[in-house]
Amino acid sequence: MSGCRRLFTCLIVVATGNSARSAIHYDLNATDDSTAPVTAEIIVDASPEEVFDLWTTAEGVKQFWVTDAIIESKVGGRYELMFNIPEDAADPYDFMYQTKILAVECGRSLSFEFRKYRWDRDERNRGNNLCALLSGRTAGTGITEEAVFRDSWVELRLDSIDGEPAKTRVRLMHHDVGRGAPSSSARDYMTLYWRSVLGK
């Protein structure tokens, strides 16, 4: 499946206002680790267009990352994810809510907001998919935001490898992790987390 066959226009588009932060590039050699993005990089056996499709469709992200998703592949479109469906009714859901795509370039790059929430269910508010959770029927009780991700965002770059069209260098930068609630352990955890996600 080619991302360039989609029904949306694949042009370089950068949102305005607060979303323009996706155009900011940090000094990755900065000595102050608290302001540098969390980074991960890998080379995968797929074309940039194939990798782009994985990150910009619900079917794609469900293959390697999350259990459910609502993705509208356009600037300002929803990028909402359910990370887990707990087997035990007492366990919480972890999900992204009211998060949007900040910038997209077909087959080349994607930027999206990353705000993570936890929902502790009770007997009256059970659901097992993201659409039900976000519909308003189940949301509203027991939901807390993880402060270390407040205002954070992810920038994904996909570069072709010279002479190897079926390979892609994937570079991920997670900006502003811990800015809402500074935590070096959160940054260390997310470094390992993103390496694991890309490895899948």
Image (spheres, helix red, strand yellow):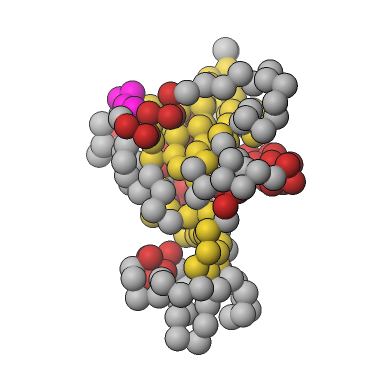
Query: Hey, which quadrant is residue 190 in on the image?
Result: top right
**Residue at image location 32% in from the left, 27% down from the top:** 13
Image side of residue 68 versus residue 11, left or right: right
- Residue 57: horizontal and vertical position, in percent? 41, 46
Q: Which residues are magenta?
A: 11-15
Query: Hey, which quadrant is residue 198 in on the image?
Result: top right
Image side of residue 77 versus residue 28, left or right: left
- Asked whether 195 or 135 is in front, the reply is 135
Tell me: residue 113, above or below residue 40: below
- Can you name the residue that lies furthest to the front here? 181
**Residue at image location 62% in from the left, 30% down from the top:** 35
Q: Is residue 32 located in the magenta-colored stretch of the structure?
A: no
- Residue 178: horizontal and vertical position, in percent? 62, 43
Quick check: can you spot residue 164?
no
Query: Hey, which quadrant is residue 138 in on the image?
Result: bottom left
- Residue 147: horizontal and vertical position, in percent? 57, 52
**Residue at image location 38% in from the left, 45% down from the top:** 100
For the N terminus, give its image quadrant: top left
For the C terminus, give its image quadrant: top right
- Report the predominant secondary structure element of the magenta stretch: loop
Tell me: residue 161, above or below residue 68: above
Image side of residue 1 versus residue 189, left or right: left
Q: Disc count in the image? A: 0
Quick check: can you spot residue 143?
yes
- Can you name the residue that lies furthest to the top here? 162
- Residue 134: horizontal and vertical position, in percent? 38, 65
Tell me: residue 146, above or below residue 77: below
- Asked whether 88 or 153 is in front, the reply is 153
**Residue at image location 48% in from the left, 55% down from the top:** 96
